[in-house]
Image (cartoon, rainbow, N blue to C red):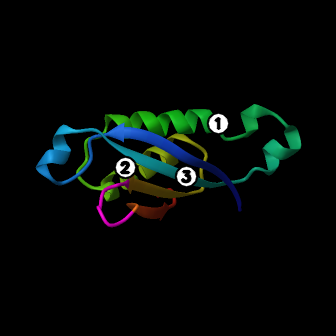
Amino acid sequence: MDTVFIRGIRVGTTIGVYDHERTITQDLIIDLELACDTGTAGASDDFKDALDYDAISRRTFDFVKGSSNYLLEAVAEQLAAILLKEFRIEEIHIRITKPGAVAIADAVGVEITRRPD
């Protein structure tokens, strides 16, 4: 299986469980690894045979920006479901990083891997 990756999508959104977090915007950094067959696109050199990195990046940004979940886990699950449904992806690995969430750590986050149902 081949992998297309998109790293470092930075999105400001409402996220967190504490009262003060519900009234501010915090940055999340999203990294995607998309398992797919790149052979057809590689052979044809035709955009219609490839994953549209820009469309996937924008869909990710728009979804996360508009979300207001409490947990990173919920953002990851919902994003995985959307991208698997809307794009030709055979498996997705999502890493969401929340910089500065814990004072004594650079960042915290969650990683999930999902396949279509």
Residue identified by numbered label 2: 78
**Vertical comparison of 41 with 113: above or below:** above
Disc 2 versus disc 1: distance between alpha carbons?
A: 20 Å
Identify the residue at horizontal 49%, vertical 56% (top origin).
94
Identify the residue at horizontal 57%, vertical 33% (top origin).
55
Q: x, y (%) of residue 10?
A: 46, 41
Amino acid, disc 1: Asp
Residue identified by numbered label 3: 32
- Label 2 close to label 1 by CB (< 8 Å): no
Main SS class of the magenta portion in the image: loop
Q: Nearer the viewer, residue 74 or 104?
A: 104
State which quarter of the image contains the N terminus.
Answer: bottom right
Q: Earlier in the sequence, mark 2 or mark 1?
A: 1
Q: Secondary structure at mark 1?
A: loop
Amino acid, disc 3: Leu
Q: x, y (%) of residue 84?
A: 51, 49
Determine the residue located farthest toward the bottom in the rendered image. Answer: 104
Q: Quarter-wise, where is residue 3 in the image?
A: bottom right
Q: Earlier in the sequence, mark 2 or mark 3?
A: 3
* Dot 2 alpha-carbon crowd within 10 angstroms: few under 14, some 14 to 19, many 20 or more: some
- Magenta stretch: give its range: 99-105
Is 52 left or right of 93, judged from the image as shown? right
Which callout, 1 or 3, points to the residue nearer the camera?
3
Residue identified by numbered label 1: 52
Identify the residue at horizontal 63%, vertical 38% (top origin).
53
Q: x, y (%) of residue 18?
A: 15, 53
Is 88 left or right of 96, judged from the image as shown? right
Disc 2 versus disc 3: distance between alpha carbons?
A: 14 Å
